[in-house]
Amino acid sequence: MENTFRFHSISEFHDFCNLPKPEHPLISLIDYNKVSYPVNDSELKWIQHFYSVGLKRNVNAKFNYGQQQYDFDSGVLTFVSPLQFLKIEINQDIVAEPTGWLLLIHPDFLWNSSLATKIKSYDFFQYAVNEALFLSDKEETVIVEILQSIEKEYQSNIDKFSQELIIAQIEMLLIYSERFYERQFITRKKSGHELLERFEQTLLDYFKSERPLENGIPTVRSIASELNISSNYLGTLLRLHTKQNTQQHIQNKLIEYAKLRLSSTNLSVSEIAYELGFEHPQSFNKLFKSKTNLTPLEFRQSFN
């Protein structure tokens, strides 16, 4: 990708930001106020080979949540995984004094620990960058205290307990972040319900169109893409509001539309199955019965 920077190590990122060499090669807490990018472009693009957790204030860049803009005074917490493509759009017309912290964690630091695998299960590391977490003042205080504890530990004399203590603090940081994300989903309930309505309508429009014949049953990824959000973000929203995952919702909407076709048309079960995107009618029959305890024919006959 043209004009895209690539950082293999934390030390390379420090050099790019005109910072002193990191005190630890595999973990570093950066004061965001001291970051100075050596480019004056309105857009920065890079790929990093390490995790980052950023808590930022007064940044002259636009942050969105679920493709919607929010003007929050609270801190903005973002999470980036290794090898994710990161793009930041900078507003050159805004002169601001950015503050905050940027925690960098190389995967090698987590090696041989339970967190090495567990960290990948946190949904927010899979979200798009613009699906940030907005913190209240109290929440921000909690996060900053943990970040500074991590820094204090790696700045101390390293001993056999150092890595284990830092990893425990990182895990605490992630657990609190998960709690705060759930709070955000709840406090933005109206926004969530609007997105759920769009999700339902997108599915209905899909099944009413010719697309199932061409593309088959819609996938989680394809529906999330149409809504301009990530699959994981959609899944988290659905689980929180409805206690069901995205695949279950797609299947439920499919069955709902199948019932409509079975009760209002003379199409055969096979024709309806193909119309809905199934390659084999048997697969449609199996799913329909698992959801309704009736075969499609038994459901149709119940109307006679």
Image: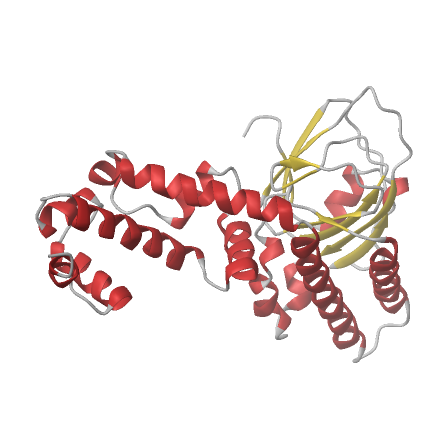
Give the farthest residue toward the front: 304
Vertically, is 46 above or below 11?
above
Is residue 296 visible in the rendered image? The answer is yes
Position of the C terminus, as image quadrant, is bottom left
Is residue 83 visible in the rendered image? The answer is no
Residue 57 x %, y %: 85, 42
Q: In this view, does 97 lie to the left or right of 89?
A: right
Q: Which residue is drawn at 62% across and 26% down?
A: 3
Which one is in front, 66 or 49? Answer: 66
Q: Residue at x 41, y 39 (%)?
A: 202
Which one is in front, 173 or 219? Answer: 219
Residue 200 x %, y %: 43, 45
Position of the N terminus, as image quadrant, is top right
Q: Which residue is drawn at 58% across and 58% down?
A: 123
Which one is in front, 257 or 27? Answer: 257
Q: In this view, does 181 lie to the left or right of 219?
A: right
- In which image quadrant can residue 275 be found? top left
Q: Residue at x 24, y 48 (%)?
A: 260
Q: How is the image coloured?
A: secondary structure
Residue 245 x %, y %: 45, 60
Residue 132 x %, y %: 69, 46
